[in-house]
Image (cartoon, helix red, strand yellow):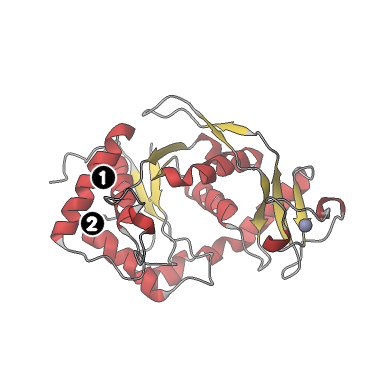
Amino acid sequence: MLVTRIAPTPSGHLHVGNAVNALLTAWLARSSPGGRLLLRVDDFDTGRAREAYLADVFDTLAWLGITPDDGPTDPADFHARWSMARHAAAFRATAQRLWAEHPEVVFTCRCSRRDLVAGGCAAGCRALGLPLQPGGTVLRLHVPDGLVVRTAPGPARAATSLPVPAGDHVLWRRDDLPAYQLGSVLADEALGVTAIVRGVDLLDSSALQLHLAALLPARAFARVDLRHHALLTDPSGAKLSKSAGAQAHPLERTDALRRRVEGWAEQLGAPLGITPPPTTP
Ligand SMILES: [Zn+2]
């Protein structure tokens, strides 16, 4: 049974690219027998989360006609039952297990981002055996040059391989929370996600997450059916989602824009085998 999710981060208003992605994800769930659609709001980035952005998630999904099968139903329900904070202790335990089981590639580091050289710790932290200490150290995953992961073969395309970005990537942050890649993989594993639709701008994330998943106890994410769609571009060829001010205001939720979003979704979904379910007008 297919389980997929819409996973917005409430650190900005959703843009048309997010809307198209949400619709494609919903279509994939609705056109799979017994398929389930989950909403997972990723609020681990507490510094940038805003109530207005959280409300925007629910308003935008309602406008698109998307009703997830599970997950928060409104901002109050999100705060009461679904904040990622409820996973922090379990995810911390998994990060520590990862560190204990893979000391050759997982290590504590006291360097800040600007201390890194070519994305790697140049201060020799790997040899120091520092404790993992909130406010003092981060946990990093070392990825050597030239590493490649194979994606799980999905129904829409043959198995393929992705280069994993080299460097010393943060797994656990200095503020005692999971970094995006680890938090995302563990949250998807906790929900039993089996398929993910995302843009080709996240190919590097997918590669890193697949590599990371293979080191984790469950390894469930390593079998996820990942489908990457092309990005929307404006007439000049620039990525629409990154246009200036694209996330400064909520989308204008008109019927006309929704029809355009549906048209874009049909165009970007076709190469991935994702089409509107029969019930969609
Ligand atoms: Zn370091």
Q: Residue at x 14, y 59 (%)?
A: 255
Percent x, y of residue 252: 22, 66
Q: Residues within 10 Å of mark 1 (few under 14, many from 20)?
A: many
Percent x, y of residue 54: 38, 69
Image quadrant, ligand 1: bottom right
Dot label at residue 64: 2
206 displayed left or right of 20 = right
Q: Residues within 10 Å of mark 2 (few under 14, many from 20)?
A: many
Res 229 quadrant in image: top left
In what element is the residue under mark 2?
A: helix
Read off the residue under disc 1.
265
Res 242 quadrant in image: bottom left
In what element is the residue under mark 1?
A: helix
Is residue 92 among what the camera can see?
yes
In whole angstroms, how far apart are the C-alphas of marks 1 and 2?
12 Å
Q: Residue at x 66, y 66 (%)?
A: 176
Q: Residue at x 66, y 62 (%)?
A: 173
Tell me: residue 244, above or below residue 143: below
Percent x, y of residue 28: 31, 41
Is residue 218 among what the camera can see?
no
